[in-house]
Amino acid sequence: MGLAHSGRRARPHPRYHLVLDCSAWNAGSAIDHQTGGHQIWKHPLLPGISAVLAGSDGADARPYQESQLRRILQALREMDERQQR
């Protein structure tokens, strides 16, 4: 029985590693350091939060990588909202 008949929704395709790199860069983050193939991205306004991005640019991003980047972007959004009040 196919997915359409099972009542379950298909999971969205993960974003590519390059897309995560671009999102981190556009948000003002930079590579803090690199260990092997792992790049540790940090934002200067968020010293306690980092994202570890590992893999080649064309590879699918892992769910934990997307959630770490999402956490950085959410913290920046919240900081921006507080400053606008």
Image (cartoon, grey):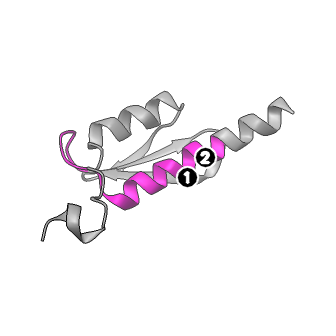
In percent of the image, x 25 and y 53: which residue is there? Answer: 36
Q: Which residues are magenta?
A: 55-76
In percent of the image, x 19 and y 47: which residue is there? Answer: 59
Local secondary structure at mark 2: helix
Question: Is 27 left, or right, of 19 in this rendering?
Answer: right
Residue 52 place in picture, x, y as percent: 40, 54
In percent of the image, x 38 and y 55: which residue is there? Answer: 65
| Residue hosting label 2 | 74
**Identity, as a three-letter code, of the amino acid under mark 1:** Arg
Q: Which mark is residue 71?
A: 1
Say which quarter of the image contains residue 28: top right
* Magenta stretch prevailing secondary structure: helix
57 shown above or below 40: above
**Identity, as a three-letter code, of the amino acid under mark 2:** Gln
The residue carrying pointer 1 sits among few (fewer than 14), some (14 to 19) or many (20 or more) residues within 10 Å by Cα, namely some
The CA span between labels 2 and 1 is 5 Å
Q: Nearer the viewer, residue 44 or 71?
A: 71
Q: Nearer the viewer, residue 78 or 43?
A: 78
Quarter of the picture containing the N terminus is bottom left
Can you name the residue that lies furthest to the front here?
5
In percent of the image, x 81 and y 33: which residue is there? Answer: 83
2 shown above or below 44: below
Residue 24 place in picture, x, y as percent: 45, 37
Can you name the residue that lies furthest to the left here?
1
Q: Is residue 70 magenta?
A: yes
Dots 2, 1 in contact, CB < 8 A: yes
Q: Which mark is residue 80?
A: none
